[in-house]
């Protein structure tokens, strides 16, 4: 049973480019369904439309066109009813840094009309469930990144929502803190909470999500379980780094295209050639002999099963991992 139904959703923004105002489509006719009780992932690079989609579904941003039903309520006609059923955890979080975690939780509960005694009880329950006892009575400004994210989760859960929206829940966390947040998300899922999360971390989508949609430039380009998406790319993936790549890759593609075991080839953004083949171990030897005979020097080679990044590359023509690394290097969030 769908808990989210989206039909032909559009959202545009005006921005400055070359000193001119231009319109940019953040979402371009998105159709989507999320089933009750699942962890649904929205995977894509920064700027793809993930946060825009989440903010619209959380009633924080109106769409330009389209229709959405969230938790059984029409998004545009019944936004107040939608808000009673959802929790929302933004990238920035919403805790007051000059109050304690417990004080933040009690205030949030009171804002949802819980009585003072019920609010204190609910805060204590969340502090225990999310293992926050050691820091809940310290000022939030003294919390570590992982502790803040656990508090953010608690704030989103204080009114026991049917549906929890998480926008990049582990952005900027160290590996240990990320693992802790993943653990908490799994516990919430086991307890029956439906979770819609955005991420650009491939391993996060692969590990956590029952189903996911891949979005790029405002359009959904693929949807399914992580396994289903990876099965779209049959066989193995051989990644080749060639000397003088600009000249060598077209020549290599021309030579390898004649081989019957090659399903397809695609150039990655980092000037590597990805070759999709049957029986990778056997095919690799033939590929290396073919390139060597043509005096094309291979700097590095790897053989792997298809990943979500291979799916993203196949659907969009560029690598999500490379896009994310480049954006992070430029300081984009």
Image: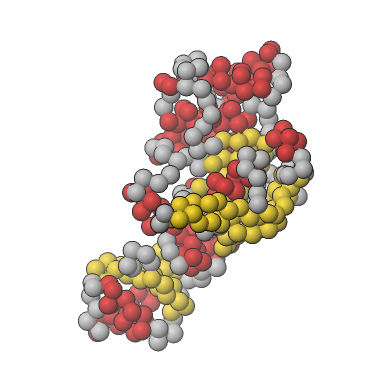
Q: Is residue 331 above or below residue 320?
A: above
Residue 123's x, y, as percent? 61, 20
Color style of the picture = secondary structure
Residue 128's x, y, as percent? 57, 22
Residues 40 and 323: in front is 323
Residue 70 visible to an observer of this rendering: yes
Which of the 4 image quarters holds residue 288?
bottom left
Which of the 4 image quarters holds residue 32?
bottom right
Q: In the shown orientation, is residue 329 left or right of residue 266? A: left
Q: Is residue 218 above or below residue 59?
A: below
Residue 133 visible to an observer of this rendering: no
Q: Is residue 183 above or below residue 1?
A: above
Picture quarter with the C terminus: top left
Residue 9's x, y, as percent? 66, 55
Q: In the shown orientation, is residue 279 left or right of residue 205? A: left
* Residue in the image at 49% along x and 51% along y: 15
Residue projecting furthest to the top: 117
Residue projecting furthest to the bottom: 258
Residue projecting furthest to the front: 20
Residue 95's x, y, as percent? 52, 25
Residues 139 and 35: in front is 139
* Residue in the image at 75% along x and 36% along y: 81
Q: How many marks?
A: 0
Q: Is residue 20 above or below residue 266?
A: above
* Residue in the image at 40% along x and 87% along y: 258
Residues 294 and 93: in front is 93
* Residue in the image at 76% along x and 50% along y: 1
């Amino acid at each position: 049973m769908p808990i989210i139904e989206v039909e032909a959703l559009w959202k545009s923004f005006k921005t400055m480019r070359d000193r001119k105002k231009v319109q940019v489509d953040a979402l371009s006719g998105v159709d989507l369904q999320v089933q009750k009780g699942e962890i649904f992932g929205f995977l894509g690079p920064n700027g793809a439309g993930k946060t825009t989609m989440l903010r619209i579904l959380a009633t924080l941003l109106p769409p330009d066109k389209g229709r959405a039903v969230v938790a059984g309520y029409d998004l545009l006609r019944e936004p107040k009813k939608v808000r009673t059923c959802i929790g929302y955890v933004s990238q920035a979080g919403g805790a007051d840094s000059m109050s304690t975690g417990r004080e933040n939780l009690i205030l949030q509960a009171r804002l949802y009309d819980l009585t003072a005694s019920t609010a204190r009880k609910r805060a204590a329950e969340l502090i225990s469930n999310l293992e926050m006892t050691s820091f809940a009575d310290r000022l939030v400004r003294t919390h570590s990144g992982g502790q803040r994210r656990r508090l953010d989760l608690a704030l989103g859960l204080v009114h026991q929502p049917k549906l929890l929206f998480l926008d990049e829940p582990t952005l900027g966390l160290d590996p240990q803190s990320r693992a802790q947040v993943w653990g908490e998300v799994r516990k919430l899922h086991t307890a029956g909470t439906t979770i819609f999360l955005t991420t650009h971390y491939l391993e996060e989508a692969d590990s956590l999500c029952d189903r996911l949609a891949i979005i790029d430039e405002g359009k959904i380009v693929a949807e399914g379980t992580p396994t289903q998406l990876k099965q779209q790319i049959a066989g193995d993936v051989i990644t080749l780094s060639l000397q003088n790549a600009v000249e060598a890759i077209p020549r290599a593609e021309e030579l390898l295209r004649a081989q019957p075991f090659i399903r397809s080839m695609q150039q990655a953004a980092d000037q590597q050639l990805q070759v999709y083949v049957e029986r990778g171990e056997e095919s690799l030897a033939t590929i290396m002999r073919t390139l060597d005979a043509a005096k094309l020097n291979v700097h590095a080679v790897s053989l792997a099963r298809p990943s979500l990044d291979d799916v993203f590359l196949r659907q969009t023509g560029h690598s999500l991992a490379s896009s994310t690394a480049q954006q992070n290097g430029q300081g984009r969030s």
